Image: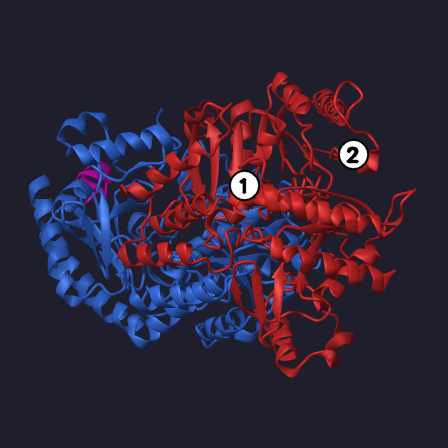
Chain colours: A blue, B red
Amino acid sequence: MTIRSTIMDTNSFRAEHAAELDPKTLTLTRRREDVLGGSYRLFYRKPVHLVRGQGQYLWDAHGEKYLDMYNNVASVGHAHPAVVEAVHSQMRQLNTHTRYLHERILDYTDDLRTTLPAYLDAEAYKAMYMCTGSEANDLALRVAKAHTGGTGLIATTEAYHGNSELSSSVSPALGSGQPIGESVWLLPAPDSYRTGIDGNGPDGIGAWFARQVRAAITDMESKGVEFAGFIADSIFSSDGVLTGSHLKEAIDVVHAAGGIFIADEVQPGFARTGDHFWGFAAHGVVPDAITMGKPMGNGIPVAGLLAREEVLASFSDTVPYFNTFGGNPVSMAAAQAVLDVIRTEGLQQHAQEVGAETLQSFKELADAHDAVGDVRGTGLFMGFELVKDRGTREPDKELALDMLEELRSRGVLTSVAGPHGNVLKLRPPLPFDRDDIGWAVDALHESLTVLS
Amino acid sequence: MTIRSTIMDTNSFRAEHAAELDPKTLTLTRRREDVLGGSYRLFYRKPVHLVRGQGQYLWDAHGEKYLDMYNNVASVGHAHPAVVEAVHSQMRQLNTHTRYLHERILDYTDDLRTTLPAYLDAEAYKAMYMCTGSEANDLALRVAKAHTGGTGLIATTEAYHGNSELSSSVSPALGSGQPIGESVWLLPAPDSYRTGIDGNGPDGIGAWFARQVRAAITDMESKGVEFAGFIADSIFSSDGVLTGSHLKEAIDVVHAAGGIFIADEVQPGFARTGDHFWGFAAHGVVPDAITMGKPMGNGIPVAGLLAREEVLASFSDTVPYFNTFGGNPVSMAAAQAVLDVIRTEGLQQHAQEVGAETLQSFKELADAHDAVGDVRGTGLFMGFELVKDRGTREPDKELALDMLEELRSRGVLTSVAGPHGNVLKLRPPLPFDRDDIGWAVDALHESLTVLS
């Protein structure tokens, strides 16, 4: 079958490459087909068999070293000793649910709220913990509906917000087979490169996007659907990594219409964007709910929701919610270690500085290659957009997929995003350092050269 | 507000007890109110502040030791060293997602399938991994709908299947504030004690339940709702811990109508019921999907779905599914250690033998106390039903809630279940041993005596 889906439609193992695989890799690949559900996909035409990770590096079973340019889960670095030891120590002590008292969930929440931008009233946000970003978004969407009494939701046309029935109903990136909710309105993300609209003011991309949001609300209300809220990843990761600060006007529209703004920070959150600890802070907006996941526990399944007290109360006054593993002492120990490492290693500033240098290098590289239409990024989250023609900006998905393979053969692991599947999504663990820029740039340069 | 909900309506901290709390406990309780969402509830009028766990025991901040009679997450024992070390070792090595090859997920799946009852074709079941039982049930319900093309679901009137929007729509135990899905039909569980119907054959409880299932399917189809499936926890944990082997006829009805049977093994699974590794095996039924969670990783968030290949394919051929943390090497290491411990420590047989002795002791105790209407159980999963009158069987919820407090003051931690909230749910970690029976029995006896 064919599924149109950027998220899944990256290169995957293909039978015709079987003969090129070493016996062990082939055996593992076949065993997956035998025992796992058909949803499991492997990156790369010739899959990678990883056995070890450290910092920003991974090693395969042959001892080959890779530069991880994709993983924002192992965000403070693969196998970070501080996280490993925090989990180990707490596991030896106690790991039980939140219906008994324990300090960790409280200390962590206090600390987490200090990471909110100064312009927010941190104490107005209450915390809920779960295990995955999907669970966080599922709950946030239910909270938005409970608070407003509405069902109408707005998301972007290539958004990905999770794998539960509800969160996937606002995740068109899952492809044409994924049913989009009846009361979900989809809007193209504010993409300056593709729209050619940039800057601020009434003709800027922010105003352009806000007009769309307003029109969507008007449309849903004209059809008898009451507006509940707008959910967006503030860096529009799945929509192609769209950096900028242009959500303010749209969020004003959302709030004026009585809707809830859910800032999905599963990808941009936890210091990655450099300038800010949270992606939404670049836009200067006030979220009603902030969802977080992937990097929160550096690989231990930890996720969270911070929501304005009165918004959350609309839900919790009516429906009980309990998450068995959510907020347990081990999850919180992992999460606390991540916050501690971000601070002690200065990873936010590091992301800002090294990210800026990397982006500069990528831009210089792009000048030398006509296939690169646009390079953008903030901190250690970058998009590298490939086109057939710089003038027409026609997306080159085939090139992007071939690039993944060429980069892999040069030890650089990454993947693609965007509605056209032509944007390399470069999002390394935060310890990615100045010394790594050369490896990434050389691999990109050589791959582009080989494929041009 | 008042929420009618067995699950949440256990005793919780009440302001009038504030003066009775030591300062540390009171401070922690207040801090929870300050920083966590209103959904968080504490067990007990005077909350317990736990700091350590080992095996079947827990210790509070004052050094008081407790017998854990409730926790099926720390199923092979709190802080089990084999699980701790397996997680520690794998965390030091590698923890990344399933789009690269790794042995652990494959070895574990091979091993997991060997635990299926011999009457099933284990190789016909394919695995999916996620982080919580809610995620497993959410996916299983979507799979059922995708496979049948229907939306009609059947669950029991006090079922709990999860906290996502979809899984909570089949979870009436969440109370009157929780919307039940429009196409969800609820049936009373097969409760021999309350219906007075027991045994097999055409007048037995199995036939009684099957007739209800048939009537529900007929009713939904008459209303234009196509039948998708039936979801049940085979020990009906939230419905009051209903042991027995009476699902066969109902599942025959489900299958004859083209529906999917989802065996929710989040509570009964992983050797707890003693006679069988999986709860559904006691009924001799063939599930189309088996969901699992809580005890699977002994506290590390691991959950899974085993589903018949052709059933799962109906979903995965159309919609991509990816769970970032699901099936990662650390999750699988924890899950593998749990399976290993169950085997090396003989915990299934242990649950069977010690469970039988415990049940016998409980039954003898019950004979001496009129307030005990029924005691039932299988392995280390027992229900202890409290009534105002043995003749009328009128449930005594107030007594059950007071019992929780009395038991707590005697160091025994547990909670309640059932539509009337009058069933003590006794479900200790599997290392619960012969030496512990006395503690449990004495605490029950003294509590019943004090309260009678």
Q: Is residue A299 visible?
A: yes
| Residue beneath disc 1 | B349
Q: Nearer the viewer, residue B261 or A431?
A: B261
State yes or no: residue A202 in magenta: no
- In this view, the residue in front, A423 or B319, is B319
Q: Residues within 10 Å of mark 2 (few under 14, many from 20)?
A: some
Choose mark 1 or mark 2, whichever is in front.
1
Q: Locate the N terminus of chain B and report the quarter of the image it occupies.
A: bottom right
Count of marks, rendered view: 2
Q: Where in the figure is residue B213, as x and y percent of width and height?
A: 72, 25
Q: Provide residue B144's location: percent of width, then percent of height.
A: 55, 29
Quadrant of the rendered image containing residue A62: top left
Identify residue type, mark 1: Gln
Q: Which secondary structure, mark 2?
A: helix
Vertical placement of A439 versus A309: above or below? above
Name the side, left or right, on which B378 lies relative to B338. right
Where residue A280 sits: x, y (%)?
43, 64
Residue plotted at (64% across, 69% down): B48
Q: Which residues are magenta?
A: A391-402
Residue hosting label 2: B192
Coordinates of residue A153 in the picture (x, y in percent): 55, 48
Compared across the picture, whether A193 is left or right of B444 comes to left
